[in-house]
Amino acid sequence: MVVTEPLIAATFVRRYKRFLMDVRLADGSLLTAHCPNSGSMEGCTAEGAPVLLTRASNPSRRLAFTAEWIRLPGGWVGINTHRTNRIVHDALRLRLVPELEGYETVRAEVPYGRNSRVDFLLEGPGLPPCYVEVKNTTWPTPDGGVGFPDAVTERGLKHLRELRRVVQEGGRAVMLFVVNREDGSFFRAAHEKDPAYARALAAAAKAGVEVLAYRVRFDVPAVVLSEAIPCLRRRGRNLEPLRSYPSVGAGRMQAEVP
């Protein structure tokens, strides 16, 4: 994905009411920007950290600026979660995810399951339909990884149930975690934030839902999916690979840490 809008530099002051962020421009003026991120953003802010903004094309919008990225000691972190699916869509179209190659069509927001819409449906001749759910992932875990979720998520649980149902019906189901920050050497479920989700993700993987994690590379204005990183799970004090048992028609598995 290439950001075509001009980027405006600012520094972080505070984030509040979920969708508001106060920033200071280079001339010292203070303004409130739209913060398109419904998560807690724990571990994603720091007073005085550099922030990149875009200006809304609609002159009548109440908040003229949108917070896009923030730079922390470990590197850039994506703030605008609305861009995550666009990044994935481009990656699928350009065949940057080897595990998901071989499909001819990519459709977004397709109805499925029980009153749900899947982020992407991949289809191709001789292949079972592949349902891909995408989760923006930014919480820095205490053990050096990046975890999802950063708060309790009933919606996330629902998506795992829908993906398991796809597998039961003979389709292919993929849970794709987009690691939207430059630090963290692996992905894992954040049992500290939502133990029910961590258990459900492990159960879904065992049932045939493929679990992938890909890091975003920030080369602004280009922002792309780059490398796959290991998917782990916490068992007691130890970390071990989160093993997926691919459903029929699955492509190459993601590498696991020994």
Image (cartoon, helix red, strand yellow):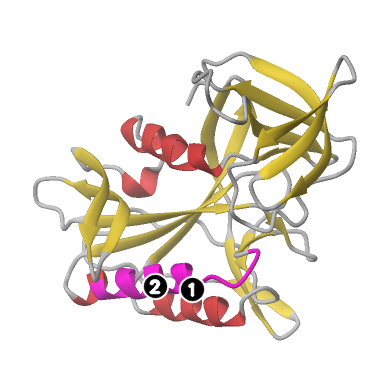
Magenta span covers which residues? Answer: 150-165
Are dots 1 and 2 in contact, CB under 8 Å?
Answer: yes
Q: Main secondary structure of the magenta part?
A: helix
- Image quadrant where residue 247 sits: bottom left
User: Could you say which quadrant of the image residue 240 lies in?
Assistant: bottom right
Q: Which mark is residue 13?
A: none
Disc 2 target residue: 158
- Residue at (34, 55) in percent of width and height: 132
- Residue 195 appears at what percent x and percent y? 61, 81
Residue visible at 23% across and 68% down in the picture: 113
Residue under the image location 47 percent in, 26 percent down:
1
Rendered view: 253 above or below 90: below
Specify whether 139 is left or right of 92: right
Q: Say if 219 sits above or below 83 in the image.
A: above
In the displayed orientation, state which residue is furthest to the bottom.
Answer: 236
Q: Residue at x 50, y 18 (%)?
A: 57
Secondary structure state at the residue bearing disc 1:
helix
Residue holding disc 1: 154
Name the foreground residue: 104 vs 138.
Answer: 138
**Residue type, numbered disc 1:** Glu
Q: Viewed as shown, does residue 100 lie left or right of 215? A: left
Q: Position of residue 126 (x, y in %)?
A: 9, 51
